[in-house]
Amino acid sequence: MHTLRFEPAGAAVSAPTGALLSDVARAAGLELNMPCGGQGRCGRCAVIAHNGVGIRRRSTVRLSSADLAAGYALACQAVVEGDALITIPPQEKIERRLVTDKTVARVDLPFAYRPAQHQTVRCFELMLEPPSLADQTDDWSRLQRGLAAAGGPSTLTAHLSLLQRLGPLLRETNWQVTAIVETDTWEQPTGPARLLDLLPSADAIWGIAADIGTTTVSVYLVNLLNGEIAAKAAEYNGQIKRGEDIISRIIYAGKNSGLPELQTLVVDTLNQLIERAARRAKIEPAQIYKMTVAGNSTMIHLLLGLPPASIRLEPFVTAINQPPLLRAGELGLAIHPQAGVDCLPGVASYVGADITAGVVAAGVVDNEPLTLFLDVGTNGEMVLGNRDWLITCACSAGPAFEGAGVRDGMRATTGAIEEVWIHQQSFEPTCRVIADPRREVRGEATPPAGLCGSGLISLLAELFITGVIDKSGNLNFMLGSPRVRRGEHGPEYVVAWAGETAHGRDIVLTKVDIDNLMRAKAAIFAGFTVLAQSVGVELAAVEQVLIGGAFGQYINVEKAVQLGLLPDMPWEAFQFLGNTSLRGALLALLNREYRRQIAEAAAKMTYLELSADNSFYEAFTSALFLPHTDLERFPSVMEVMGVRSQESGVATT
Amino acid sequence: MHTLRFEPAGAAVSAPTGALLSDVARAAGLELNMPCGGQGRCGRCAVIAHNGVGIRRRSTVRLSSADLAAGYALACQAVVEGDALITIPPQEKIERRLVTDKTVARVDLPFAYRPAQHQTVRCFELMLEPPSLADQTDDWSRLQRGLAAAGGPSTLTAHLSLLQRLGPLLRETNWQVTAIVETDTWEQPTGPARLLDLLPSADAIWGIAADIGTTTVSVYLVNLLNGEIAAKAAEYNGQIKRGEDIISRIIYAGKNSGLPELQTLVVDTLNQLIERAARRAKIEPAQIYKMTVAGNSTMIHLLLGLPPASIRLEPFVTAINQPPLLRAGELGLAIHPQAGVDCLPGVASYVGADITAGVVAAGVVDNEPLTLFLDVGTNGEMVLGNRDWLITCACSAGPAFEGAGVRDGMRATTGAIEEVWIHQQSFEPTCRVIADPRREVRGEATPPAGLCGSGLISLLAELFITGVIDKSGNLNFMLGSPRVRRGEHGPEYVVAWAGETAHGRDIVLTKVDIDNLMRAKAAIFAGFTVLAQSVGVELAAVEQVLIGGAFGQYINVEKAVQLGLLPDMPWEAFQFLGNTSLRGALLALLNREYRRQIAEAAAKMTYLELSADNSFYEAFTSALFLPHTDLERFPSVMEVMGVRSQESGVATT
């Protein structure tokens, strides 16, 4: 065993030869960011090893020779071989823009809520006849008889802990109680109804609708008696520090105790949100008797502690697409321990409950028009169909649109460039930066720190339309602009000069970045194409495009069409629906009919596995141009390019 | 806080003023017998308090002035008021005759066991198609599909812990697994089937049938594939030290932490038996996937941790007569944690699952003849009826027939007089004593220590038939026998002289004892009478008397009839069925049809509450004679008395 001392925490722990430094640090209770899930790719877990012989570096890809000279090592790639003194640098705090927390936008339900008809959890006020020598019915049967007489279900089950309290409780309340009953679940065959709790009285019972996103977790706290949303809360998924994207989390879950750790992190996040929402609505979390959860398949696996490994490996299958109804207590959720936790059903490894809930929330299953439903993030998940049929696929777009895998990419937080305009003659950019509220108050501009997803789309489209890049993404060195140059990493366009930026370095978009972005947009557009082909319809036949997900809210459709990320359709055909996953969870929470629709949607959705589909590669290759090999598909883009080329005199190639 | 030191254990603990000494001792882990449940009635928890001021005696009814002078106090009635040194005398070890343990009598089932038709827990060997890009069905759906194809149920649920192991398990076993499935329960409406476990293979799956008696707990370990009993085990209920009878246990359960303690004690007893049976059959307890439990209502309440207080208090109702199916893990039972634990349904506070199971096991519900089913213990529970109707009641006979409440009464263990014959002329008794096996081996007689239930019945009948007592139970001092005398406690008959006994004291039956026994037998016979009256049939119309319960096995029918405990019927009409409760549990374990019959019997049994019935008191008073006020009801007894009185010249009054 070797002794490892950690500074500045001052902790000293023993570890055997071969132990991973990141595991040792975690065991010592020391926090290290690992956005890549411990793959050695992100470099965020770098620490300083003061004793060179105690630590062996398995991989140093993220470290420069200067870093190595200074003693840096990646904790997730450093193996203990002797005693060592380790300094953990201050860890980057996650500080992002969470516009959705607290904002209780008015949510209109597409139906008039009637609990007796729609709700599976109800409360019944009972006035029971006390037992007598003439009526020695046992307490439990007496309660069931009273419940049936009050219009409730006639057969009941309950958790043992409630049965143990039954006798004293009925006598203390003088046989007048409120029964909280899960009258049924939405599914068939269903067991007996379940008594969740008995209370002296109850003026409201509550439910939680939750969306577990890879990045953000959001909840609604809902009054189950009237269907009103009493509070909303959102927070970054606590798993982020163990992997920014789904793949990193799956890898992390495969490590020693990685899975229970990820489960605890997301449960903690949910519990914080529940507590916050309950505080805002001035209720007790123990009054929450139902929870409905949407999320992608990996997030649901991690919430339930199911090993997600098979999601990532061919043939890409989940452990379970339709989890059974669970109890909050089993999962450590800090609501009533008997509350049912209903994880909505998914379709496949990369088409999860967020999509099935989203499709129903977006009304796709109700409507006749041919609809394309789209959720763009690390993966582009898309559904094509209408009320008669649904087909779905997921394109691995990579994290480029989320600002990762791009040199100066960043998330949509303070300092991110979210929109860019390029002057047709000077090729000088104008940027809109996400403002730091503290500077904003003082009337100061916020210096840019990088480019977020919407900024990247905007920039790439502008570069193309102004002719700074050609349809293959090559930079035009003939323009005479100082912003087009050969940098350390090859050709690049300078978006902001060092003197203007937050960190004093140039912000650039390199040819490598451009290629990444083009591959991402090509993957998504190829998805549309293959989806349409597979059912024998033209993409042009799509009548509406419904865009869900947080990213969708900030996308500029015009720019996205100019890139060839979205199909060229009139503006009115696009609708941005925000968090359709959360909305679907809300509908399922309140109305068993919507819950049934989501299950039906999951059952009838045909999943197209693109990795098994040759036509996908073909469509992808065709889409690897701006906007596309086949310009006929983008008449509006052709028109803009025509206008601009006349203005600037630059040929459109 | 005061300091209490306990000898000889040497433990020292702190306790506040007012603490009960028995609670303090238990908290210190020291064992004290409390057969009366801490009511201060039995005197078994007597300890010596060496410091008179530290302990206040709340009650001393069981202590003589000599005891008090020696410092004795009843721990259950002693309140801490200062520091004290306490000596705990050696505690009486429970040592009784347990003839039923180990003896695997061949048990014939009344049906040919076919698991596919009868059994709710079955195993299915599955060879699943591995997933591929062409078939990306999730693991859970794949398993269900395979199960349905193998003839199993098509919808399934499972505990989260099993779902968490699902993916790795299917891959490790190369998609060839044995699924242990609870295909349904006997009841309607039923939920989806439940996957209990997945194993690489299973050559047998096991079940436990259990009878929890107030005194004895018995189990069968059964192979669920062929219905064969592989082992049997029986043990005294570990709760005995906290109360010999039901009422004492209910009182003890009402004390601080009494209920969880009693629950733990019976669970421990069951776990010991399960472990013992498993060892005998050479199987692992984790291979036991189902358990069916019979027992009286109080025993079932204590097993489930349900407060039993209302059973004892007017209007005498249970918390629950038909418990839901529970999981072994919830109860701490050391079998497979997901095994269903099916507590059979009872009818009322004093007519429990032991009786409903017994009635079905005895075949009462199948047959046309009018049948009296009887289980005599502390309570005499009886059922009158046939396949068309059933009526039941329970008579509080008191514990006299179990040897308690009788001066020299004892349980049926080593040294107990179990049968007595009295000489018609000399009035000298001949006794059969339950032998000490160690003495028996050496050819020595075992000296008597007291009278057990069957001995008391035998003795009382002999005293009556020989004219030592009259029909009112008064001793005949005119006989000139030295055995009839006035003792310290009034008139008595000496069964054994001090020189012959194990403890060197005379063994006597006092007039007080006789009165107790007569009240007990009168209560039971009054029960028969009222039951028959209430449905308008004559007791003479009963065609058979089926006697269940352990006590029934040792009863001498002839003597019992002579007392007027049992109705006067030909010998052939009586059948002793042994432990019908355990047999009923076995039938329910193996065959859902019998399980349904037991539920039906419980539902259709009319319960007669005797404390609300005036005719009971009348019938009781009439039965307070030997054999009865109405001698016409006992023709065979009249005949014997006639013969004997001629022989001895003593008038029969």
Image (cartoon, coloured by chain):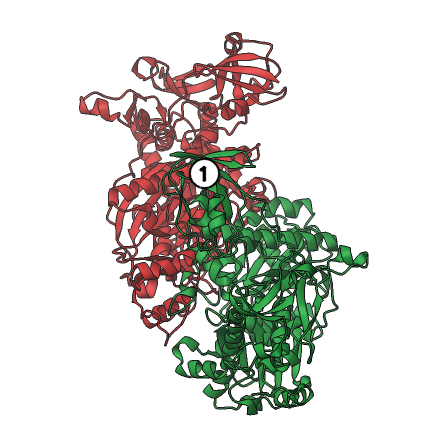
Chain colours: A green, B red
Q: Is residue B564 above or below residue B286?
A: above
Q: Residue furthest right?
A: A442
Viewer-nearest residue: A13 or A328: A13
**Which quadrant of the figure contains the C terminus of chain A?**
bottom right
Residue at the location (60% across, 73% down)? A594
Is residue B353 shown above or below A463?
above
Residue B31 in picture, x, y percent from top left: 45, 24
Give the quadrant of residue A291: bottom right
Near-viewer residue (B101 or A270): A270
Tally the numbered discs: 1
Image coordinates for residue A573, horizontal then vertical, percent:
65, 85
- Residue B116 appears in the picture as rendered: yes
Residue located 47% across and 57% down the image: A41
Q: Is residue A129 visible?
A: no
Q: Position of residue A287 (x, y in %)?
A: 67, 53
Chain containing the residue with disc 1: B
The quadrant holding residue A644 is bottom right
Identify the element where label 1 is drawn: loop
Q: Is residue B521 left or right of residue B283?
A: right
Amino acid type, label 1: His
Residue with the mark numbered 1: B628
